[in-house]
Amino acid sequence: MSSVLVIEDLTVVYGRRRRGRVVAVDRLSLNIEEGTTFGLVGESGSGKTTVGRAVLGLIRPASGRISVAGEPVRHLALRAAVAQGKKAQVVFQDPAGSLNPARLVLDTLREPLRIHGRLKREASTRAAEALGGQVSLAPGMLRRLPYQLSGGQNQRAAIARALAPGPRLVVCDEPVTALDVSTQAQVVNLLVDLQHRSGVAYLFISHDISVVRHVSHRIGVIYAGRLVEVGESSSVSDSPSHPYTQALLAAIPVPDPARQRERRAGRRSLLGTAADDALPADGGCSYRLRCPWADEVCQRVDPELQSVTEDHLVACHHAERVLLSRSVAPAATGPGSAADS
Ligand SMILES: Nc1ncnc2c1ncn2[C@@H]1O[C@H](COP(=O)(O)OP(=O)(O)OP(=O)(O)O)[C@@H](O)[C@H]1O
Ligand SMILES: [Mg+2]
């Protein structure tokens, strides 16, 4: 299989000089194979959207290389980026906000077909209706304005628009976060179904690891701009070996309220907002301030990603012990005892 997206050593910095300088993405590398889904998961402020914007050419990285379908991504103004968007497209969190409110959905879908497919009026209408059919929007629905549709229907329209130019990659940035739970499942299933039909690849961005692991072939966990764990979806969710990944998994609600309370208490110190933690100026692991496993090595040495098994990499000095702790006591999020002992 060949890669449709290659990101090498991407660093993105917002702001200038000392005041307000934020390293939003820090030396991040990842690959997405043709026709597959890579789930990028992490809490608010961890840098997920920034990665997506860099892939789309909407921001200029401080360093690193990105290529989509073998071609380097250049930084472009928004309009030019949309025009060149044949290879990579995007679906945002807020479907109503990303569609033109004054335009019939049909016309929104016809536009990329006219530009990229060079179709005349009649033909583009038929093609837009066929596209609507693929996302279960009947021709009558397409002749409405976004405010006349539900959130889920708007997101279907946004997905159809993204697929219209026949992209190889779609960046889905929290595509179901704004939808109610029952609609979320429908839209996720639609994305999976469309991938089977068209062979499109997704960079699927979400703060919710329960959604991500459901749709992704591979998962990358991002913390404070760094990938801390990456690998096959089942390896990462069944054998999470970074304390942060374990904390994200432990935060998935469970039906039993007593167990839920127990787990909440356990994870409080592990989750929070990434922005709370200033990046350590003196080396060391960026997760160490929250980490129950942190020891003297973690204070000094910033861990690099290393393989624990084939196609499963973890940036933690204690990855093996962290994984074992979980298989012994799956309900616990980390050994409070490790810090005590
Ligand atoms: N335009 C900007 N100017 C300055 N800082 C920014 C800008 N956009 C994002 N940041 C900062 O960069 C970091 C990463 O932000 P980003 O939006 O990529 O995170 P995210 O993981 O997508 O978060 P969320 O889940 O809330 O969408 C944050 O610290 C954020 O405050
Ligand atoms: Mg975001």
Image (cartoon, rainbow, N blue to C red):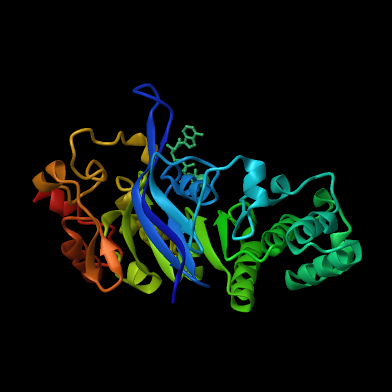
Q: Is residue 207 left or right of 84 when viewed as pictured?
A: left
Measured from the top left, where is residue 39 in percent x and y? 46, 62
> Toward which corner of the image does residue 288 lie, by quadrant?
top left
Give the total of numbered labels: 0
Q: Give the camera-side residue of 249 and 284.
A: 284
Measured from the top left, where is residue 116 in percent x and y? 73, 60
Q: Is residue 301 left or right of 8 when viewed as pictured?
A: left
Measured from the top left, where is residue 47 in percent x and y? 43, 45
Q: Identify the residue shown where x is 43% and y is 56%.
A: 41
Q: Is residue 4 left or right of 288 when viewed as pictured?
A: right
Q: Is residue 47 above or below residue 259?
A: above
- Can residue 255 be seen here? no
The quarter in which the N terminus is drawn is: bottom left
Measured from the top left, where is residue 292 in percent x and y? 20, 49
Q: Identify the residue shown where x is 26% and y is 60%.
A: 314
Q: Identify the residue shown where x is 35% and y is 35%.
A: 276
Q: Is residue 204 left or right of 134 when viewed as pictured?
A: left
Q: Residue furthest top?
A: 19
Q: Give the camera-side residue of 93 and 209.
A: 93
- Can residue 25 be seen here? yes
Q: Identify the residue shown where x is 47% and y is 53%.
A: 207
> Toward which corner of the image does residue 134 lie, by quadrant?
bottom right
